[in-house]
Amino acid sequence: MNSNPTVNPVVNKASKPLRNTKVHGHPGERNPRACLTEDAVRIARKLYEPYSRQWGVRALARRFGVSCTAMHHAISGKCWPHVPM
C-alpha cells in the first residue's frame, strides 16, 4: 500500500477533520434532501412487519410517500443510524 496520504483511504478519512472536510454529509433532517423525519423513521420502525401487506416496506413507503429503497434503508438502519432502533 502506498504511504502517500492522498492515496491511503484510512489516512484520508482520519485527516478529514484536520483539513475541514466532512466525514459524512448532514445527518437526518438537517440534510436538505431528506424525505423523512426522525419521528417518521421511529414510527416506521415500530410499525414494520416483514412480508406484511399492510405493514411491509412497500406499504410503509406508500404511506410515508417515499421510495421502497428509502424506506428499506430507514428501517434497516443503513440510513438514519443515529435514530435508535
Image: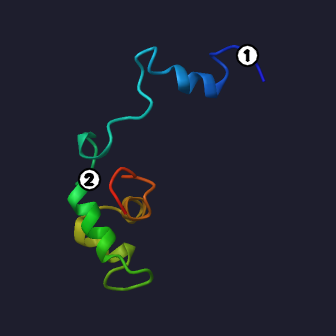
Q: Residue furthest bottom?
A: 53
How many residues crowd around disc 1 within 10 Å: few (fewer than 14), some, or many (20 or more)? few
Per the rendering, the mark at residue 53 is none
Measure the C-alpha gap from mark 2 to mark 1.
40 Å
Q: Specify whether 63 is left or right of 77.
A: left
Identify the residue shown where x is 31% and y is 85%: 54
Which quadrant of the rendered structure holds the N terminus? top right
Which quadrant of the structure image shows residue 67?
bottom left
Establish if 42 lies above or below 11: below
Q: Secondary structure at mark 1?
A: loop
Q: Specify whether 45 is left or right of 23.
A: left
Which residue position is annotated with label 1? 3
Q: Closer to the camera, 58 or 5?
A: 5
Identify the residue shown where x is 28% and y is 43%: 33
Which quadrant of the structure image shows residue 58?
bottom left
- The answer to whether residue 61 of the structure is visible from this angle is no
Establish if 23 lies above or below 60: above
Which mark is in front, 2 or 1?
A: 1
- The answer to whether residue 31 of the structure is visible from this angle is yes
Q: How many marks do you count on the picture? A: 2
Which residue position is annotated with label 2? 35
Q: Secondary structure at mark 2?
A: loop
Q: Residue furthest front?
A: 84
Establish if 17 lies above or below 25: above
Which quadrant of the rendered structure holds the C terminus? bottom left
**Residue 40 in picture, x, y percent from top left:** 23, 62
Q: Residue furthest right?
A: 1
**Residue 48 in picture, x, y percent from top left:** 35, 76
Identify the residue shown where x is 32% and y is 36%: 26
* Colour convention: rainbow
Q: Identify which amino acid the numbered label 1 is placed on.
A: Ser
